[in-house]
Amino acid sequence: MFKKVLIANRGEIAVRIMRTCKEMGIETVAVYSEPDRLALHVLEADEAISIGPAEPSESYLNIEKIIDVAKATGAEAIHPGYGFLAENPLFAKACEDSGIVFIGPPSRVIEDLGNKTLARTMMSKAGVPIIPGMLEATEDTQLLKKEADSMGYPLIIKAAAGGGGKGMRVVRAPEEFVEACTGAISEAQKAFGDGSIYLEKYLDRPRHVEFQILADEHGNVVHLFERECSIQRRHQKIIEETPSPALTEGLRARMGEAAVKVAKTSGYVNAGTVEFLLEPSGNFYFLEVNTRLQVEHPITELTTGTDLVRHQLEVAAGKPLGLRQENLQQRAHAIECRIYAEDPACGFIPSPGKIIGYEEPAGPGIRVDSGIHEGYEVPVHYDPILSKLIVVAEDRQFARLRMIRALENYRITGITTTVAFLLDVVRSIPFAKGETFIDFIRTHFAQWKPDEDLARVAAVAYVVDEILGGSKTVAAVSRTGYPTPWQSLGAWRL
């Protein structure tokens, strides 16, 4: 096993990886940009090395600097987390060429599966159902328009490289196509350095269901069941759960078998996720493979009793996978809410700033994967995810109620977050019924605003607190000797 691992990432995922490394007796090396010098992942690591200014291209995306730090610190392996360089085949190849183990699939596999049209072709040949659409990408708008008119509307434009919703456009009418096409090419070029796009038939109200896979270099492949990821904003997930309320045992088995076939067809090694779109009819289609650890991996860990990072490290070290499909079971129900520094009332725009107060919920069945602390300055330069709140309970209803309580007791002050929005989503009747389709936010919460009455009560509580002594913490009594409003009014956001 490795003695030292460098984590080429930041925030909550870097902290989460470090904690498993420490359990396994592996030393950790953090890398950080100048704004992150007091970040939690820097404080938790055994070693922390500055790699440059805030600009990602000069720090977290700088392959040469990260490889140099790994060599200088004696790190035998690099874990890329998610985002940044995690799905960059050039980074995986640079690790391979430098004699450093990349904790993820081989560079060739990342490259093949990162090209969406190539991946679709591979899966089609292997008999995995794919969404009707183009098998070759292009930047030729005239050719694309011809394909679109032949395919029919509505359709969806996708970037051949990359993911995360970049370069994606839904086109519902012919007159919208050229403008949408031009915008998608431009966005894809800026995000991935490749403006190639392709077209797929737009499915009406599908669910987004993904399967966790694990594979080793000895030919062993298993899936660890599904995650329902349909609640999204800007094509990015914000709430995930497992099991999916839409899957029967038979459908789960068929989709799991397809996920394993995808892994074997591509020569996959390590942890990854096979994503599908599921129609109300029960038909499902291959969407893509995320060649990395997913943000939402904790709900799989809590319902299967596995540590996915531990398995990643062991597989990367050459050990055979110690899991067998027939022995894997789902137990209980888990839900994850992603906590972002964003303003949901203003189109989810980022909300950077200083965290004045921070208090995590606690209790049975509650897990918080966090990358922040009180006093931390949330930078404007990176993805605004702060933490992940995960709950597990014996069934979906109890898990939902537990999530409501956890969100009610999650206190982050000084910046605007998505906590109040997520609380309203989880409380909603459509969510309670399991009616979670990819248009969920657009259908039910497009005009969401925070509760103004609640905000006014919080403001009054703050003023009363100031009058009674200006206590900023939950104490037994204020300096006047009277109980403060914070004791009786709950965990308010300022």
Image (cartoon, rainbow, N blue to C red):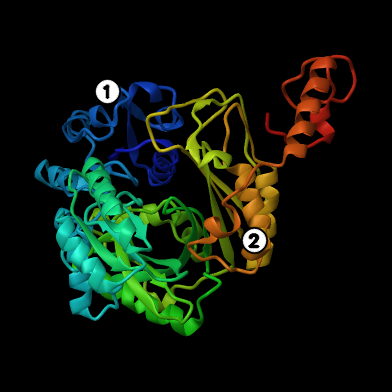
* Residue visible at 77% across and 16% down in the picture: 470
Q: For mark 1, what is the residue?
A: 52
* Residue visible at 38% across and 44% down in the picture: 21
Q: Name the amino acid, label 1.
A: Gly
**Whether residue 63 is situated above or below residue 294 in the rendered picture:** above
Mark 2 and mark 1 in contact (Cβ < 8 Å)?
no
Of all residues, the one furthest to the right in this rendering is 482
Q: Is residue 219 visible?
A: no
Of all residues, the one furthest to the bottom in this rendering is 250
For the residues marked 1 and 2, what is the alpha-carbon distance in whole angstroms?
42 Å
Q: Where's residue 222, x and y in %?
A: 34, 71
Q: Quadrant of residue 259?
A: bottom left
Query: Which of these two is toward me, 428 or 33?
Result: 428
Q: Where's residue 245, x and y in %?
A: 56, 72
Circle 1 Cα neighbour tier, 10 Å, few/some/many (<14 / 14–19 / ≥20)? some
Give the secondary structure at mark 1. loop
Instruction: Name the disc covering residue 173, or none.
Output: none
Q: Is residue 419 visible?
A: yes
Lower sequence index among marks 1 and 2: 1
Residue 297 appears left or right of 274: right
Circle 2 Cα neighbour tier, 10 Å, few/some/many (<14 / 14–19 / ≥20)? many
Q: For mark 2, what is the residue?
A: 399
Q: Quadrant of residue 450?
A: top right
Q: Where's residue 463, x and y in %?
A: 79, 21
Q: Name the amino acid, label 2.
A: Ala
Where is the C terminus found, in terms of image quarters? top right
Query: Which of these two is toward me, 59 or 450?
Result: 450
**Whether residue 164 is situated above or below residue 360 in the rendered picture:** below
Give the secondary structure at mark 2. helix
Q: Where's residue 407, x and y in %?
A: 65, 46
